[in-house]
Amino acid sequence: MNLGIRRLLLGVLLGVLLYGGAVGYTGYQRVHLALSSFHWSAFLAAIGLASLNYCLRFGKWQYYLRRLGVTQVPVAESALVFLSGFVLTITPGKLGEVFKSAVLARTHGVPAERTAPIVVAERLTDVIAIVIWVVVGSAGFRGGGYWAVLGTLAVALGLLCILWEPPLRSLLAFIERGRWARWGPKLASAVASLRVVASPSALALPVVLSLLGWGLEGVGLHLLLAGFGHAPALSFSMFFYATATLAGALVPVPGGLGVTEAMIHQQLVSLAGTPEPIAAASMILIRLATLWWAVLVGFSALAALRLRFPSQLGAIPATPLPPSEPSAPQATREIRPN
């Protein structure tokens, strides 16, 4: 947990420097003047849309748990476990959200190696959905196709690595013979779960939920621009947000910090003709309403879980694969890939 806190503080520091630099570059007085005429109800609406996206993403989490036969977790507690993963949203590709698997292992005895692959499936379906949004909106822009191609290649490579069995079997056999042999059974369990949640038959519903969820956050950016009285066409806002989010997901930086912000600002100014102060303020506000709101929600959920499970959540390990088996009852339903 201490490692996670250090990473979070580093991300916060990076964010403060980044947003402060953007305001300084644009001009504090100019940004302040733009914000003085902003309708703050638009910011609340953007937070509400981001929160609705979290609800849809929770639906994916529940779907994947059921695919894995994990059915003994009450819905309310499962929601808190899911949201607690947002504590480590500020990690490359949001893979730090695997933290929720460690929390689930502590609170309900579900082995972390069994549910950790859900995070990979979540990111895979997120990228598929964002690529679709980019492709839909890229017809009238230069540069969008580039990120769409990169995203498509990333999805194809991910699916190939997951579904092509011989290399996976060879890798597991090599690990079991080497110095990491003790991790062999856990990794084999993780691979089995990954093949279940990332199989082609398991992609359709999560991709639809991701399409709706990320579309809502794109609408959030549009509402923020409208709050300044300078909104482009909705399709433009959706495209700008999708390409920036995809770039932030593909470039290995914590939470996409720097990459996502730069692309939102650059596209608003160069493609939509948004004035610099409004572009800078909109970029900061949309990241506050999505990335940083998620972190706040994550800490709130984790605090609620600590109250509910005070003895189990004394010190949560940074690794998603606990060295010892949890003592709580475990689900016993067998996992069968489709």
Image (cartoon, rainbow, N blue to C red):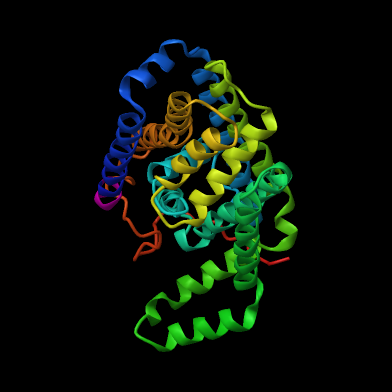
The reply to whether residue 101 is in sight is no
Range shown magenta: 1-5
Place residue 184 in its image quadrant: bottom left
> What secondary structure is the magenta-colored segment mainly?
helix
The reply to whether residue 304 is in sight is yes
Number of dots carrying numbers? 0
Find residue 310 and report its horizontal and vertical position in percent: 31, 39
Q: Is residue 123 left or right of residue 88?
A: right
Find residue 312 and report its horizontal and vertical position in percent: 34, 46
Place residue 197 in its image quadrant: bottom right
Q: Residue at x 64, y 35 (%)?
A: 238
Q: Residue at x 62, y 32 (%)?
A: 237
Find residue 328 and report its horizontal and vertical position in percent: 43, 53
Along the line of sight, the residue nearer the viewer: 54 or 288: 288
Find residue 61 and report its horizontal and vertical position in percent: 58, 46
Considering only vertical position in the picture, is 156 above or below 264?
below
Q: Is residue 102 left or right of residue 206?
A: left
Considering only vertical position in the picture, is 205 above or below 28?
below
Residue 218 is covered by the magenta coloring: no
Considering only vertical position in the picture, is 81 above or below 173?
above
Along the line of sight, the residue nearer the viewer: 324 or 321: 321
Along the line of sight, the residue nearer the viewer: 241 or 12: 241
Going by the picture, which residue comes out furthest to the bottom? 177
Q: Residue at x 64, y 39 (%)?
A: 239
Along the line of sight, the residue nearer the viewer: 330 or 5: 5
| Quadrant showing the C terminus | bottom right
Q: Residue at x 40, y 45 (%)?
A: 258
Q: Is residue 159 left or right of residue 73?
A: right
